[in-house]
Image (spheres, rainbow, N blue to C red):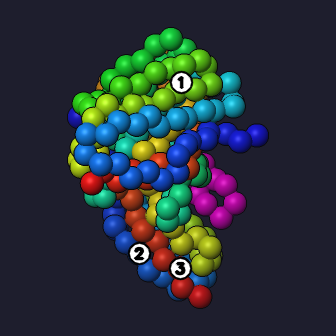
Amino acid sequence: KQEVTQIPAALSVPEGENLVLNCSFTDSAIYNLQWFRQDPGKGLTSLLLIQSSQREQTSGRLNASLDKSSGRSTLYIAASQPGDSATYLCAVRPIFEGFQKLVFGTGTRLLVSP
Amino acid sequence: NAGVTQTPKFQVLKTGQSMTLQCAQDMNHNSMYWYRQDPGMGLRLIYYSASEGTTDKGEVPNGYNVSRLNKREFSLRLESAAPSQTSVYFCASSEGSRDRGDLEQYFGPGTRLTVT
């Protein structure tokens, strides 16, 4: 059964720092991996979707990489800002557990202080 | 373009009461999903509908029923609410059908449900 782990659970950095959030998954048989942002009391906003055949995706100051063979993804945030404070979730879409399902990690709670 | 909408935003129920959570999407997506989010557990799939007229169980279906009313709407019903169903419920949709596993899911804002 696919399991997704995110480390660290919480991270606090000063504004301007570059930072890396980690996501690992146990089964490399996935269709894709998706990174989400969740603000307190709000829904999920999709940030980046990486298909299994891709190595990375970029959107503005965000860059996500995928190493399927080692079961790892990283989300790199450049020049962090207080507005980046949120919980970041990663989720994989397993091939062999019913492809309709996303398996989520429990998230990294990020606080960027001015 | 509203995307995925959910009603209500908040609800408090007493044990044994019933209620229906509503979800609608305006993106002409085939597939719709219901998830619940609990502290320390991540989001878990309750039910999904791969296409209009079909529904299937997800990871945690017990205590819930669903209806895919039409292509736009997918509702989640709690027949007899229990405190263990206190959670945040998210609806999502994607273009995907049974043949496509590679498409992005879009999420609604959530319904925060408390059962006392």
| Disc 2 and disc 1 on one polypeptide chain | no
Name the one closer to the observer, A62 or A100.
Answer: A100
What element does badge 3 sit on? strand
The magenta segment is A55-65
Q: Which image quarter holds the C terminus of chain B?
A: bottom left
Residue at horizontal 69 percent and vertical 31 percent from the top: B26
Q: Which residue is mark 2?
A: A11
Q: Within 10 angstroms of label 1, few (less than 14), some, or many (20 or more) residues?
A: many
| A61 on left or right of A107 | right
Image position, residue A112 (x, y; %): 53, 79
Residue at horizontal 58 percent and vertical 84 percent from the top: A15
Name the one closer to the observer, B101 or B49.
Answer: B49
Which subunit holds the residue at mark 2?
A
| Disc 1 and disc 3 on one polypeptide chain | no
Q: Within 10 angstroms of label 2, few (less than 14), some, or many (20 or more) residues?
A: some
First in residue order: circle 3 vs circle 2: 2
Image position, residue B29 (x, y; %): 63, 25
Image-quadrant location for residue B31: top right
Q: Given the image, on which type of amino acid does mark 2 rest?
A: Leu
Which subunit holds the residue at mark 3?
A
What element does badge 1 sit on? strand
**In the drawing, what numbered circle is on residue A112?**
3
**In the drawing, what numbered circle is on residue B31?**
1
